[in-house]
Image (cartoon, helix red, strand yellow):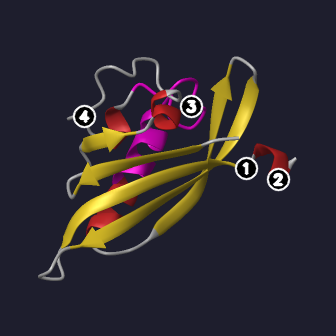
Amino acid sequence: AFEAIGLLDRDGRVIEINRAGRALTEDGGTLVGQFLWDLPWVGRLDGVDEEGRNQLEAAVGRARLGEVVRYTVEIQQPAGQLQIDLSLTPVRGVTGEVEYIIPEGRDITSVKS
């Protein structure tokens, strides 16, 4: 089990990402500065096509407007398919505007099985 967590700017660019988040990508070294939906996710079944990419980009857009977004993503890993509970939580600054977005991914594979 793991919990991937990161920090995005309000536009969806990666500022920080933890080891568990990097483990879900093919190239953990070049993630900072990239948009979350452009990261090289390993075997993401819904991200192989534009629909999955667009879904994540739209979710970041909703979080930028202040909405907490949550849905399940399926990722194919060498050990098998994972069910990831993905949430995007907006973080407001002193003016009340969304300044950051916190993406979190929890492995819920054993819960859903």
Whether tag 2 and tag 1 are in contact, CB under 8 A, the answer is yes
Label 3 vs label 2, nearer the camera: 2
Question: At label 1, which amino acid type do we have?
Answer: Ile
At horizontal 27% and vertical 66% (from top left) the residue drawn is 64
The answer to which image quadrant residue 98 occupies is bottom left
Can residue 48 be found in the magenta stretch?
yes
Q: How many marks?
A: 4
Whether tag 3 and tag 1 are in contact, CB under 8 A, the answer is no
Question: At label 2, which amino acid type do we have?
Answer: Val
**Where residue 36 sits in the image (x, y, percent)?**
34, 41
Question: At label 4, which amino acid type do we have?
Answer: Gln
Q: Mark 1 or mark 4: which comes first in sequence? A: 4
The CA distance from mark 1 to mark 4 is 26 Å
Say whether residue 65 is left or right of residue 51.
left
**Where residue 48 sits in the image (x, y, percent)?**
51, 28
The residue indicated by pointer 1 is: 108
The CA distance from mark 4 to mark 3 is 17 Å
Binning the other alpha carbons within 10 Å of mark 4 as few (below 14), some (14 to 19) or many (20 upward) gives some
The answer to which of 42 and 3 lies nearer the viewer is 3
The residue indicated by pointer 3 is: 44
**Secondary structure state at the residue bearing disc 3:** loop
At horizontal 56% and vertical 31% (from top left) the residue drawn is 44
